[in-house]
Amino acid sequence: MAGRPRLDDAPERLVRAAVGLLAEQGPSAIKARTVASASGLSTMVVYGHFGGIPELMRAVADHGFRELGAAFAQVPVTDDPIADLFAMALTCRRVARENPHLYDLMFGLSTRATYRPLSDADLRLSGHSPAFRDAHVHITAACQRLVDSGRAERQEPEVIAAQLWSLVHGYITLELAEHFGEFEDPVVQVMLPMGVNFSVGLGDERERAEASHEAGARLYDSIVQGR
């Protein structure tokens, strides 16, 4: 029907347009009119496919988790699970720094601006969406390898993954909010030693944990250089 295009790729175009607006202008730019204009579609297409901006932003958050999962998948599985986990932690940091507003949206934060709120049900389920689970499984699998290696005391890998997720996410959130301005290199001075301490707390030897984190940093660098 004229004036109401129903293109098969419209949802993806709208999501990518919203991601771009978040990166360039922040959440204040996310309106049906601006997203439609950036995607070359009409506002009716926004409402027709998503129902409204809150629902579109849920799809944008899922897009962010799919991108994060794809980035995790680029980290090769080595014989050192701690190195693998630290490489994934650095990968998560890179993804967050590339689009901080998208990262905020993915994790329900509003440190840089505010969003039209999702429903309570959406907020409760945001950590259980298929897109989130598909990203998080990379962390859980590496934690399983860590437990199997004997370098961590025997416990459920899901528990270790949740603890590590909290640690990494907390660091990233503070860094994005510029709480580490006094450090010349917060990754080396804060993030890496924090990971070492976490590994030691799980049962690893300190020297071995330090070597693994240094190996993880090199692994991450090789991935970035190959992009």
Image: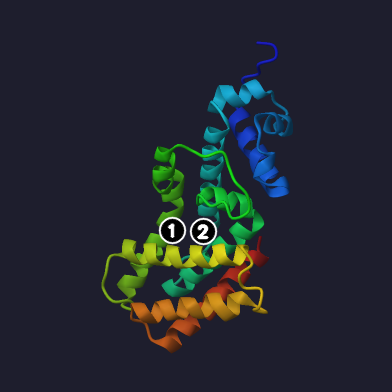
Say which mark, if any, is on residue 138: 1
Image vertical order of residue 118 relative to residue 75, above or below: above
Amino acid type indicated by mark 2 = Phe
Circles 1 and 2, Cβ within 8 Å, touching? The answer is yes
Amino acid type indicated by mark 1 = His
Distance from Cα at disc 1 to Cα at disc 2: 7 Å
Q: How is the image coloured?
A: rainbow
Residue at 36% in and 71% down? 146
Residue 155: percent from left, percent from top:
27, 69
SS assignment at label 2: helix
Comparing 84 with 183, the one in front is 183
The residue where tag 2 is placed is: 72
Q: Is any part of residue 90 visible from this angle?
A: yes
Residue 111: percent from left, percent from top:
59, 55
Q: Is any part of residue 7 visible from this angle?
A: no
Residue at 59% in and 31% down? 11
Question: Quadrant of the image for the C terminus?
Answer: bottom right
Residue at 51% in and 43% down? 62
